[in-house]
Amino acid sequence: MSNKTIFILGASRGLGLGLAKEFLARGWDVVASERSRSEDLHALECDALRIATADVTDPDSYADLGFGNGQLDVLFINAGISGAKHQSSEQATPDEVAHVMMTNAFGPVRAAKTLLPAIRDGGTLGFMTSLMGSIADSSGGYELYRSSKAALNMLAKGVAEQDAGPRGIATLALHPGWVQTDMGGPQAPLGVEESATGLADVLESASGKGFRYADYKGDDLPF
Ligand SMILES: NC(=O)c1ccc[n+]([C@@H]2O[C@H](COP(=O)([O-])OP(=O)(O)OC[C@H]3O[C@@H](n4cnc5c(N)ncnc54)[C@H](OP(=O)(O)O)[C@@H]3O)[C@@H](O)[C@H]2O)c1
C-alpha cells in the first residue's frame, strides 16, 4: 500500500514547517511549498518530501504543481500573515486590506478550489484559521487579522457546502493555539511541535463530508 500524501501550502517556517516534519515522521509523503528558498525546509530533504514553489496570492504559481486527480489525502493551506502592524480599521489603506484579505482568505480559498480535484474523494481539506476569526469569541482589536480570518471561516464553510462536501471531503478550519513562531512571538505558551502534533492528529482523524471549526486539540470553536 502506498503512503498517504499531504500538500502543505506555506511550509517554509513556523507551523507549516512543523507540520511537514510531523507528517514525515508519521510516514506520509509530503509536498511542502515555499515562496523563496527555505534552508529549514530543504534541511528535511528525503525521498518522502517534495518541495514546491507557491504563493497563495498568485494562482499561476499553484495551478500546475503536477498533482494527479485524487492524489492527495490531505490538502492543507497554512499560509497566512498578520497584516499591517497598526491593525486598525481607521488607518487601513485599500492596499493593506487587499493584501491581508488576499493572503488569509480569498487566496487560500481560491487555491483550495483550484486544487480540489487533486484531493481524493473522502479525503480532507484543511485551512489554517485562528480563534481570532471567531465573531462569537471576539473582544475586538486586531481588526485586519480578525476580519481576514472571519472571512476565511465563511469562505471555507462555503467550499465545504458546495465543493468538498459533495465529494465526501471533510473540510476543517483549524486554530493552532497561540504558538511560538515569527507570528506568535516568543511569549506564546505553545511550541510548534506540540501544536503540529495536535493539528496532525485532527487532520488524520477527520472523516465525512462535514465542516468543522476546531482547535489543535480537536475541540469545536464557536463561530
Ligand atoms: N502562531 C500563532 O500563534 C498562530 C495562531 C493562530 C493562527 N495562526 C496561523 O497559522 C498559520 C501559520 O502561522 P505561523 O505562526 O507559522 O506564522 P509564520 O511563522 O509567520 O509563518 C507564516 C508562513 O506563511 C507563509 N506565507 C505568508 N504569505 C504567503 C504567501 N503569500 N504565499 C505562500 N506562503 C505564504 C510564510 O512563508 P514565507 O517564509 O515565504 O514568508 C510562512 O511559511 C497562519 O495562517 C497563521 O495565521 C498562527
Image (cartoon, rainbow, N blue to C red):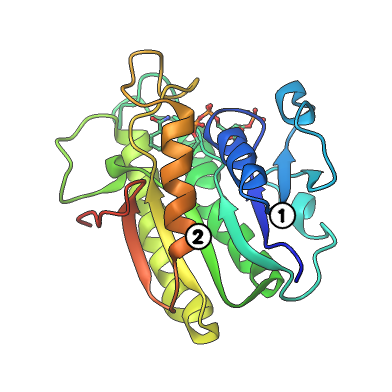
Q: Amino acid under label 2?
A: Glu
What is the quadrant of residue 46 in the picture?
top right
Is residue 53 rendered to the left or right of residue 163? right
Q: Mark 1 or mark 2: name the one nearer the start of the chain.
A: 1
- Residue 130, by quadrant, is top left
Tell me whether circle 1 and circle 2 mark residues in contact (CB < 8 Å).
no
- Answer yes or no: disc 1 within 8 Å of ligand 1: no
- The residue positioned 77% from the left and 26% from the top of the image is 43
Q: Nearer the viewer, residue 170 or 27?
A: 27
Specify the farthest residue to the front: 1
Q: Which mark is residue 193?
A: none
* Residue designated by label 2: 204
Q: Is residue 87 visible?
A: yes
**Left or right, residue 40 beside residue 124:** right
Residue 92 drawn above or below residue 9: above
Mark 2: give few (<14), some (14-19) or many (20+) Cα within 10 Å.
some
**How packed is label 1: few (under 14 Cα within 10 Å), some, or many (20 or more)?**
some
Q: Position of residue 12 (x, y in %)?
A: 67, 31
Q: CA distance from mark 1 to mark 2?
A: 27 Å
Q: Which amino acid type corresponds to the residue marked 1 in the rendered image? A: Pro
Q: Which mark is residue 59?
A: 1
Q: For numbered disc 2, what is the local secondary structure?
A: helix
Between 39 and 130, which is closer to the camera in this rendering?
39
Look at the image and tell me in which quarter the C terminus lies: bottom left
Residue 38 point in image, percent of width and height: 74, 26
Residue 83 in sight from this viewpoint: no
Farthest residue to the bottom: give it: 166
Q: Is residue 121 above or below residue 20?
A: below
Q: Is residue 183 above or below residue 95?
A: above
Count of picture labels: 2
Which secondary structure, mark 1?
helix
Which residue does the image show at 55% across and 42% down from the upper left? 103
